[in-house]
Image (cartoon, grey):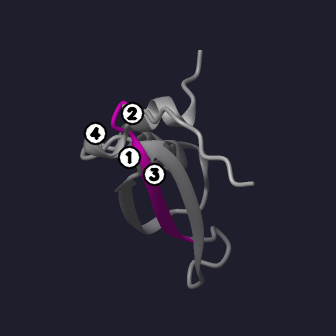
Amino acid sequence: MEMSETEMMLKGYGLTTAEFFYRMPDYEHVLNSFVWQEYDIAPDHPRLFSFIEYWQDQIEGPLHSVQFTHRKMIAPGEWRQLKGEFRIN
């Protein structure tokens, strides 16, 4: 069963955004880019590195470089349960 986004964030996952720069097989002098986003765990980034391995094994366009950033969406001290309701009439 797959975790929801909230469960992933509470377990330490954060949003990782990577920009891949690659060359087309027929036009090696042209540099293209591809943007990838996924929830991942820092500092190991297993999903990012798994995708890089997939790219190198399955996609013909050779990678030139990868730039990525990672942001935790919820830190442990930021999550709290609220009980209450405000009604504005």
Q: Which residue is mark 3?
A: 15
- The residue pinned by badge 1 equals 74
Q: Position of residue 22 (x, y in %)?
A: 53, 69
The residues tagged by marks 2 and 3 sit, at their Cα atoms, a distance apart of 12 Å
Proximity of marks 4 and 3: CB atoms separated by less than 8 Å: no
> Are discs 1 and 4 less than 8 Å apart at CB?
yes
On the picture, is 74 further left or further right than 4? left
Q: Is residue 59 left or right of residue 41?
A: right
In the picture, residue 89 is in which quadrant? Answer: bottom right
Given the image, on which type of amino acid does mark 1 rest? Ile
Query: 73 above or below 66?
Result: above
Of helix, strand and loop, which mostly describes the magenta segment?
Answer: strand
Is the residue under label 4 in contact with that under label 2 (CB below 8 Å)? no
Which structural element holds mark 3?
strand
Tell me the residue at 48%/29% (across/down).
7
What residue is drawn where x is 56% and y is 57%? 36
Residue 2 is situated, as x and y percent measured from the top left of the image, at 58, 22
- Whole-angstrom CA distance, mark 1 to mark 2, is 7 Å
Task: Point out the tag, 4 or 3, that comes first from the N-terminus.
Answer: 3
Magenta stretch?
Answer: 11-22
Q: Amino acid at mark 4?
A: Pro
- Seen in the picture, residue 21 relative to 1 is either above or below; the reply is below
Q: In whole angstroms, how far apart are the C-alphas of marks 1 and 4?
A: 7 Å
